[in-house]
Structures are given as structure tokens and as C-alpha cells.
Image (tube, helix red, strand yellow):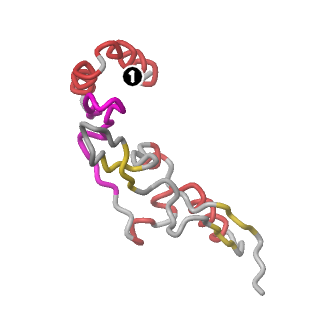
Amino acid sequence: MSTFDTIVIGSGHNGLVTACYLAKNGHRVLVLERDSTIGGAVRTETMFQSDENPNGFRMDVGSSVHIMIHQTGIIEDLELEKYGLEYIDMDPIMSYPVPTGKGVIHFWKDVDRTLESISKVAPEDVENYKEFIDFWGK
């Protein structure tokens, strides 16, 4: 029977990074995952099916926009590119189908393009998004 110093529950990116750092520091680590594949919420599912859109939209379940990881040193420290990690910058960064089926909001690198997209689907939220961007941009 194997023994472990540490058991990590969940194989999402946070669990995997934690397990890597523990192993790198000499711990015998076991990672347990309830799903059949690793990655946690980094997977694609069909969502928002409606009468107008019976096929729905293929979307990632969790965030695939990991902006802050580039500021942490994790990629370099764990040599993740050596093992196949490749981040692809996209524009739009993400798209969000409105659950009512009345359109899609595209989030672009260019804030003005994003505001234009929001205005087509939810014009009442344009000012709220501007305030959000102003707050987090400081």
C-alpha cells in the first residue's frame, strides 16, 4: 500500500499547481478527482439551448481567461510550456450568449468594441460596465 504526505482533492488548475509545488518540494502527493478527466472546470459543455437556438452554445464551464497567471511566474517555475501548455491570445477574449436567447455579448480587448456589443443586447448595462472597467483599471 502506498503512503502519501499530502492528498489534493480536485484536479482543477489550482489543485494541479498545488500538487506540483508540493511534489517539487519533496512531498509524496496523491491527486484525487471525481470526474473521469483532469482539469476541473476547464472543459466544454453545451449550454443555453432554447426554441430559437436548439443546438445551444458550446462553452467552457469555468474560466478559460487566465489573465493573471502570466504575472505569477507559475508557467516558468513549473516549466509548463515544456509539457505542452500554450496560451493563445484571442480577440474577442470571450463571448457570452444571453440566456434569453436574444443575442451574444462579445468581450473584446478594445473596451469600446465591448461597450458597442453590450449596447446591442443590454443597453441598460453599458454604464455599469464602464464603471466596472474604470474601477478595476485603477
Look at 33% across and 31% down and name the residue there.
Answer: 98
Q: In this view, does 55 lie to the left or right of 131?
A: left
Q: Is residue 15 left or right of residue 127?
A: right
Look at 43% across and 49% down and name the residue there.
Answer: 70
Residue 67 in picture, x, y percent from top left: 41, 43
Q: Locate the C terminus by quadrant.
A: top left
Residue that badge 1 annotates: 133
Is residue 42 shown in magenta? Answer: no
Q: In this view, does 126 lie to the left or right of 30?
A: left
| Callout 1: SS | helix
In the image, farthest residue toward the front: 51
Q: Which amino acid does label 1 sit on?
A: Ile
In the image, farthest residue toward the bottom: 1
Q: Which of the 4 quarters of the picture holds residue 11?
A: bottom right
Q: Give the residues in magenta.
A: 87-108
Look at 51% across and 66% down and name the residue there.
Answer: 38
Is residue 88 shown in magenta? Answer: yes
Residue 53 in picture, x, y percent from top left: 25, 41
Magenta span: predominant SS is loop
Q: Locate the N terminus by quadrant.
A: bottom right
Residue 112 in picture, x, y percent from top left: 23, 22
Q: Is residue 84 left or right of residue 75?
A: left
Look at 50% across and 49% down and name the residue there.
Answer: 72
Residue 113 in picture, x, y percent from top left: 21, 26
Q: Nearer the viewer, residue 92 or 83?
A: 92
